């Protein structure tokens, strides 16, 4: 096995792995993981994946985004038409996106496992050592959460296999979720809640507990989702009173930030293409992954989030940019949450490269808590927390009062609050609403809740993998 070290980014190449990645500058792993600096660099390499193409660019955007009813391909009709397969659920086991997202997440798991296996062996500061391993475990849990939501049960690798054998059958969905819970629980016990300014963006105790509460929601363990989200609520987070400020660079790592990826343009890592691929077509970016008319219609009258989520042709932003696309064949709406004002753009790394990826916000925690409370019969708490989110949106309190009405109100609130943040498709699957909203697009119950395991991964498993139903 070899370790590639390139600008603090480690990529592992294993003959038996599902991912065979090679790069220049390979370094024999026996010469690495010997110093404290090695441990820090290896952990930084996990973070670097969070801003990568696979995790913020095309694969993630059309797997999590276009499959929902709030996001469509965008750009112009002839550009990257292969993405339409995600809009109408005609992707296959051989599709590059199905394969690309799979490969990316396994690369990330492997980076985390490098730290989890090797850093404990290094003679270094024990407190830092324990913290780095905890960071790796939380990040590994996040990658497994992505995998299980998209592909279902996948093999569990708790560290690098001692025998070097990566070929193993898929674990069950329940086993994967229990593994994620174990990682997040262990990480939360060690991680600090705050860091020094020089370490902004590292995962925290609140981040681990916040992600854990979301995982419990997906597991339908409402009691634990409620208890864990209550822990997060007690930790001092708060909604940003200004929804526009929340998504601009000035709002990064603010009071609402629970788990956020630092995409600041740097010599070591470059930036991120998260905003560039979604930026106004041929004005700021490529113009992909744009709002649908269904999303536009989902907002209630008076909801300020509508115009702060949807950027429109011909409008002038609060920051003074006149929006004017450079491609007459492109649509007229874009994702305003990723917009970076011209005055703040760092052109060194490309448009929007400083735009952070908000993986988990406090608004999500409040809605997780509200949903869990409602399922447990605690109507008062559910109403209180959904209303906190609605008040920020300048909407009146919810009129829902029964459990069923509140359930639907909370799901609707998730749709408009978290619009275009890669939550809609898994939310629809999780809540059993996918056929209702996505059936007209081609969604088939019993099949499209999951993506297929990529063909090459099936072939490389030597018969150990069983394909998902319908593929």
Image (cartoon, helix red, strand yellow):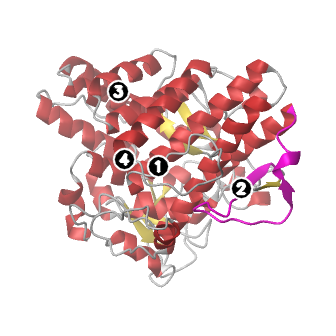
Q: Which residue is mark 4?
A: 172
Q: Quadrant of the C terminus?
A: bottom left
Q: Which residue is mark 2?
A: 12
Q: Is residue 170 above or below residue 293?
A: above
Q: Is residue 90 above or below residue 144?
A: below
Residue 56 seen anywhere in this rendered image of the structure: no
- Depth check, mark 4 against mark 3: the one in front is 4
Q: Residues within 10 Å of mark 3 (few under 14, many from 20)?
A: many
Q: Residues within 10 Å of mark 1 (few under 14, many from 20)?
A: some
Q: Main secondary structure of the magenta part?
A: loop
- Depth check, mark 2 against mark 3: the one in front is 2
Q: Which mark is residue 146?
A: 1
Real-space CA distance between mark 4 and mark 3, rounded to the nearest whole angstrom: 21 Å
Image coords of residue 224 (percent x, y): 34, 23
For the point 76% across and 59% down, the residue is: 349
Pointer 4 with pointer 3, Cβ within 8 A = no
- Depth check, mark 1 against mark 2: the one in front is 2
Q: Which residue is mark 3?
A: 225
Q: Quadrant of residue 431?
A: top left
């Amino acid at each position: 096995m070899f370790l590639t070290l390139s600008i603090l980014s480690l990529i592992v190449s294993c003959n038996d792995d599902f991912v065979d990645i090679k790069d220049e500058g390979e370094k024999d792993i026996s010469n690495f993981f010997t110093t404290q600096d090695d441990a820090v660099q290896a952990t930084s390499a996990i973070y670097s994946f969070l801003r990568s193409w696979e995790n913020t660019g095309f694969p993630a955007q059309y797997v999590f985004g276009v499959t929902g009813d709030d996001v469509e391909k965008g750009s112009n009709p002839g550009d990257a038409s292969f993405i339409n397969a995600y809009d109408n659920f005609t992707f296959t086991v051989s599709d590059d996106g199905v394969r690309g997202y799979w490969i990316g997440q396994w690369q990330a798991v492997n980076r985390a496992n490098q730290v989890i296996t090797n850093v404990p062996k290094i003679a270094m500061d024990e407190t830092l050592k324990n913290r780095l391993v905890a960071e790796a475990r939380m990040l590994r849990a996040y990658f497994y959460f992505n995998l299980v939501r998209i592909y279902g049960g996948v093999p569990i690798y708790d560290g690098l296999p001692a025998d070097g054998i990566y070929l193993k059958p898929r674990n069950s969905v329940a086993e994967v979720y229990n593994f994620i819970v174990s990682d997040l629980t262990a990480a939360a016990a060690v991680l600090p809640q705050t860091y020094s300014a020089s370490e902004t963006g590292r995962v925290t105790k609140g981040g681990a507990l916040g992600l854990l509460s979301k995982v419990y929601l997906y597991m339908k363990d409402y009691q634990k989702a409620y208890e864990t989200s209550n822990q997060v609520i007690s930790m001092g987070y708060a909604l940003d009173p200004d929804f526009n400020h929340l998504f601009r660079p000035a709002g990064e790592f603010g009071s609402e930030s629970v788990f956020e990826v630092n995409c600041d343009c740097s010599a070591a890592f470059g930036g991120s293409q998260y905003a560039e691929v979604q930026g106004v077509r041929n004005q700021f970016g490529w113009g992909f992954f744009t709002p649908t008319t269904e999303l536009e219609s989902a907002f209630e009258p008076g909801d300020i989030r509508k115009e702060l989520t949807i950027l429109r042709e011909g409008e002038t932003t609060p920051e003074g940019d006149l929006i004017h696309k450079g491609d007459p064949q492109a649509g007229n709406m874009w994702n305003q949450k990723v917009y970076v004002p011209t005055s703040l753009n760092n052109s060194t790394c490309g448009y929007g490269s400083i735009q952070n990826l908000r993986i988990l916000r406090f608004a999500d925690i409040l809605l997780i808590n509200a949903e869990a409370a409602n399922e447990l019969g605690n109507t008062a708490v559910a109403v209180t927390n959904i209303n906190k989110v609605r008040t920020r949106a300048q909407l009146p309190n919810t009129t829902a009062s029964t459990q069923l009405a509140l359930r639907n109100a909370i799901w609707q609130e998730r749709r408009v609050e978290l619009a275009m943040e890669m939550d809609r498709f898994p939310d629809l699957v999780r809540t059993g609403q996918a056929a209702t909203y996505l059936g007209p697009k081609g969604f088939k119950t019993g099949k499209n809740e999951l993506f297929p395991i990529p063909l090459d991964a099936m072939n490389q498993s030597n018969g150990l993998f069983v394909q998902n139903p319908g593929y």
